[in-house]
Amino acid sequence: NTGRYIPWIHVDLVEGDQLRAWFMTKGGGSEAPATLIMSEPILGFEKLKSGVIDTIVKYGPLPCPPVIVGVAVAAGADIALTLAKKALLRPIGERNPDPNIAKLEVELLNALNKLSLGPHGFGGGVTALDVKVDYAYRHPATFAIGIVTSCWATRRASAIIRPDGSWEMTSKHIRHVGGGCTL
């Protein structure tokens, strides 16, 4: 879809002389369950855990399970939801480098799969393929929790473009070969 503000492009400026680009398409069903919880900081990670589970239960088959869940904690709504969506770019099975956050990802994944929503909500053992958690520093008085989902058919691609104009597809299943790409 193209039109006013679409496609949506988000840019993070980082050091270096390369452009690293990621592309992700999402359908309406998997976008609908996006949830923002402006939690009291004292409730912290317990509210995060219950919020993730409650969101998946509430929306059931809408995001086409099994889902990939992106979760983030930040100072404000915009940052929490942006980081949660960016977390979906990480490959399935890749854990957050922070061991405490990685442990939380596994804990949430196990809890979601105990729900047994199964494919498209028809029941079965797998509700979620993965959970990705990220965070930004925040003020002690804030605890914004962003929760987003993507369906089992999450489509992602990535590439590097260098200053000399050369480029390389870096997606796991797509590789630049000569003048074109191969799957």
Image (cartoon, rainbow, N blue to C red):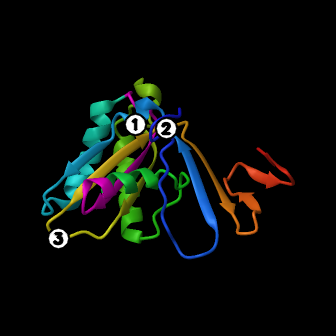
Crowd band around label 3 with a 10 angstrom C-alpha radius: few (<14), some (14–19), many (20+): few
Name the residue tied to disc 3.
Answer: 140
Residue type at mark 1 is Glu
SS at mark 1?
A: helix
Residue at 51% of width from left, 41% of height from top? 7
Mark drawn on residue 14: none
Q: Are marks 2 and 1 in contact (CB under 8 Å)?
A: yes
> In this orientation, which residue lies closer to the viewer: 99 or 114?
99
Find the residue positioned furthest to the front: 4
Q: Position of residue 36 (x, y in %)?
A: 25, 47
> In this orientation, which residue lies closer to the viewer: 149 or 13?
13
- Range drawn in magenta: 61-79
The Cα–Cα distance between marks 3 and 2, rounded to whole angstroms, is 33 Å
Find the residue positioned furthest to the bottom: 15
Residue at 12% of width from left, 63% of height from top? 42
Q: Is residue 105 magenta?
A: no
- Ranked by sequence position, the earlier of labels 3 and 2 is 2
SS at mark 2?
A: loop
Q: Position of residue 151 (x, y in %)?
A: 48, 36
Residue type at mark 3 is Pro
Crowd band around label 1 with a 10 angstrom C-alpha radius: few (<14), some (14–19), many (20+): some
Q: Are marks 3 and 2 in contact (CB under 8 Å)?
A: no
Mark drawn on residue 31: 1
- Ranked by sequence position, the earlier of labels 2 and 1 is 2
SS at mark 3?
A: loop
126 with respect to 135 (left or right): right
The image shows a total of numbered marks equal to 3
- Ranked by sequence position, the earlier of labels 3 and 1 is 1
The quadrant of the rendering that contains the C terminus is top right
172 is higher (above) or lower (below) than 97: above
Name the residue tied to disc 2.
Answer: 26
The Cα–Cα distance between marks 3 and 1, rounded to whole angstroms, is 29 Å
